[in-house]
Image: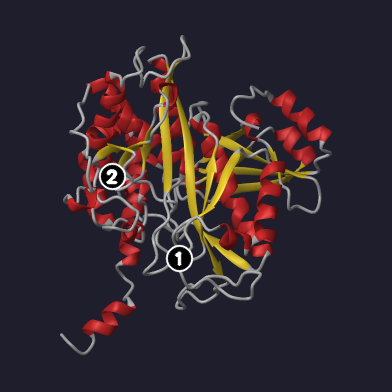
C-alpha cells in the first residue's frame, strides 16, 4: 500500500472488512520517529474517523521531556490544546505480528481550523512536496537503511555486542557483503521479509554491511511520502522481529565504538510531471543544469541542515574520516568518499545520493531536508563546486562536529526556515537544545578514565 493508491475512507472500510480487522492502531510519527497514538476497537475507529491528541505529543524530545519555557511555546499552545488527527487511508497496513486481525494507519495532524499542524514531521514533508508540485516536478527517492543486530542489552552501562547466530558464535570480525554472515540469522530475516510482504513494504536487497552484525536493506524507488511511511513501518517491524528472536535491532548512528556507523542514504531524482522525463538529464543524455543546480543546493545548505539528519549527540560520532561516512559535502560520480554521490546510471535513471543522513534520522524530516536543499539549489540556480575525483577524506571537514554547533548553523540559515516552515524549525531546535542540555549533565566513562586523577 503506497501513496500511489488513492484510497478514500470508504475504500479503507472495505479494506478493513476484507481482512476482518477488529482493532486499529492509530499512529502518528513524532519528531523522533516514535509511533504515538491510540489503539481503537474497529467500531470506534469507524465511528470517529480520527482521534484527538495534545499538540506536544508530536513535539517532544527522545527522553519524553518538554521545554519549560521559551520560543517553543510561541508555537505550541501553553494551554496544551488538542490536534485533530485524521487517518491517511493510503497508509493502512496489517500488523503481521498481532494475535487478532489488527491494522495500523498513519494519521496527519490538523489544527482546529483544519490546517496541517506545521511542526508535525509528515506535515513538513508535505510542505516541501507542495513546493515541487507548484514547479510541475515530482521527486522520486530510494532509501538505503543500515542497522545493527545486537545481543539483548538491558543495562545502559554495558557495551553492546554482536548477537549469537546459528553457528553458536557471535561475529568478531568484519563481514562486508558476506552471504554466510547474513545466513547466520536466516530465521530472523525470513520473518522480516514475511512481515514486510504482509505489510506490502517495497523492500529490495538485503546485504551485510561492514560492521559486525551490521545489515542494510534497500527500498525500491517511489514517491517520498509513501517511502517515508515505509521506512517508519520498517523500523518498527525490524525491532519487533528482532525481539522475537531474542536480540535487538538498533538504528543508532554509532552504537558500537570501533565499528562503522549506520546511515540512511537517500537516492533522489526529479520527474517532470507533464512529460514524465527525468529532469536531471538533457535530451542527448548529458547532465542537465537542473542536475547541477540541485547538487549546488545540497552543497550550499546541507551543512546548515545537518541537525535535521544528525539529530542526536551520538549522530556526530558517525561522521569521521575513513569510516564509510562523509565529513564534507564534496560531490562526485561513483565516489563513496563524498557526501553527495552520483551513481553510474543511464540518463533516464540519473540521480543523486545523499550519504550524509544517519539511520537515526526521522525519515519524514530527512526527506524533507534533502529535498528542501535541492529545491533551493534549483530556485537560486546554485552552481556546485567542481567534481571531487579523488579521496574526499583528504579534504577538510565541512560539516558541524557536534549537536550544539549544528543547532547554531540551522538557526542562522533563514532560507531553510522559509522552505521548511518557521514553526517547525523553532519547535525542532528547542527540542534538540533540550536534549543537548540533558546530555551535558551526564559524565562519561572517558572523563572519569582520563580526567579523574590526571588534571
Quarter of the picture containing the C terminus is bottom left
Q: Please identify the quarter of the rendering in which residue 6 is found.
A: top right
First in sequence: mark 1 or mark 2? Answer: 1
Q: Closest to the observer: 295 or 15?
A: 295
Q: Position of residue 352 (x, y in %)?
A: 36, 33
Secondary structure at numbered mark 1 = loop
* Visible residue check, residue 53: no
- Residue at x-position 36% and y-position 69%: 258
Residue 304 appears left or right of 45: left
Q: Measuring 70% from the left and 60% from the top, which residue is drawn there?
A: 187
Q: Provide residue 2's location: percent of width, then percent of height.
A: 61, 31
**Residue 338, label in figure:** 2
Foreground label between 1 and 2:
1
Mark 1 vs mark 2, CA separation in Å: 22 Å
Q: Residues within 10 Å of mark 2 (few under 14, many from 20)?
A: many
Q: Please state the horizontal and vertical placement of residue 281, each as a whole percent of the image.
A: 36, 19
Q: Nearer the viewer, residue 90 or 417?
A: 90
Most foreground residue, 117 or 321 = 321
Q: Which mark is residue 174?
A: 1
Name above or below for residue 187 compared with residue 27: below
Q: Residue at x 55, y 45 (%)?
A: 232
Tell which of 94 and 287 is nearer to you. Answer: 287
Amino acid at each position: 500500500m503506497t501513496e500511489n493508491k488513492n484510497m478514500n475512507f470508504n475504500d479503507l472500510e472495505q479494506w478493513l472488512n476484507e481482512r476482518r480487522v477488529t482493532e486499529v492502531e492509530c499512529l502518528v510519527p513524532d519528531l523522533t520517529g516514535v509511533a504515538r497514538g491510540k489503539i481503537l476497537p474497529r467500531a470506534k475507529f469507524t465511528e470517529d474517523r480520527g482521534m484527538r491528541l495534545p499538540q506536544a505529543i508530536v513535539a517532544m524530545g527522545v527522553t519524553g521531556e518538554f521545554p519549560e519555557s521559551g520560543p517553543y511555546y510561541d508555537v505550541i499552545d501553553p494551554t496544551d490544546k488538542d490536534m485533530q488527527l485524521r487517518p491517511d487511508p493510503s497508509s493502512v497496513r496489517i500488523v503481521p505480528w498481532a494475535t487478532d486481525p489488527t491494522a495500523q494507519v498513519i494519521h496527519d495532524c490538523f489544527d482546529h481550523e483544519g490546517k496541517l499542524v506545521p511542526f508535525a514531521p509528515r506535515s513538513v514533508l508535505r510542505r516541501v512536496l507542495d513546493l515541487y508540485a507548484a514547479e510541475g516536478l515530482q521527486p522520486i527517492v530510494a532509501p538505503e537503511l543500515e542497522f545493527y543486530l545486537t545481543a539483548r542489552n538491558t543495562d545502559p552501562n554495558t557495551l553492546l555486542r554482536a548477537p549469537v547466530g546459528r553457528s553458536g558464535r557471535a561475529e568478531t570480525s568484519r563481514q562486508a557483503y558476506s552471504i554466510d554472515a547474513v545466513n547466520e540469522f536466516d530465521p530472523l530475516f525470513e520473518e522480516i521479509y514475511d512481515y514486510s510482504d504482509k505489510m506490502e513494504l517495497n523492500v529490495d536487497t538485503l546485504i551485510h554491511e561492514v560492521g559486525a552484525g551490521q545489515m542494510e536493506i534497500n527500498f525500491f524507488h517511489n514517491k517520498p511520502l509513501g517511502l517515508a511511511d515505509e521506512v517508519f513501518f520498517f523500523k518498527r517491524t525490524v525491532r519487533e522481529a528482532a525481539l522475537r528472536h531474542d536480540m535487538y535491532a538498533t538504528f543508532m548512528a554509532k552504537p558500537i565504538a570501533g565499528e562503522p556507523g549506520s546511515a540512511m542514504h537517500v537516492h533522489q531524482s526529479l520527474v517532470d510531471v507533464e512529460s514524465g522525463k527525468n529532469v536531471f538529464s538533457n535530451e542527448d543524455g548529458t547532465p542537465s543544469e537542473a542536475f547541477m543546480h540541485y547538487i549546488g543546493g545540497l552543497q550550499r545548505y546541507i551543512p546548515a541542515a545537518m541537525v535535521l539528519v544528525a539529530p542526536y549527540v551520538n549522530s556526530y560520532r558517525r561522521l569521521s574520516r575513513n569510516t564509510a561516512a562523509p565529513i564534507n559535502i564534496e560531490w562526485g560520480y561513483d565516489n563513496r568518499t563524498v557526501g553527495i554521490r552520483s551513481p553510474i546510471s543511464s540518463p533516464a535513471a540519473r540521480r543523486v545520493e545523499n550519504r550524509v543522513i544517519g539511520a537515526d534520522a526521522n525519515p519524514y524530516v530527512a526527506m524533507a531536508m534533502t529535498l528542501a536543499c535541492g529545491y533551493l539549489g534549483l530556485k537560486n540556480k546554485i552552481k556546485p563546486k567542481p567534481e571531487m575525483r579523488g579521496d574526499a577524506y583528504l579534504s577538510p571537514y565541512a560539516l558541524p562536529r557536534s549537536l550544539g554547533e549544528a543547532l547554531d548553523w540551522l538557526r542562522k540559515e533563514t532560507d531553510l526556515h522559509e522552505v521548511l516552515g518557521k514553526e517547525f524549525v523553532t519547535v525542532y531546535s528547542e527540542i534538540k537544545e533540550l536534549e543537548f542540555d540533558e546530555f551535558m549533565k551526564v559524565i562519561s566513562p572517558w572523563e572519569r578514565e582520563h580526567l579523574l586523577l590526571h588534571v
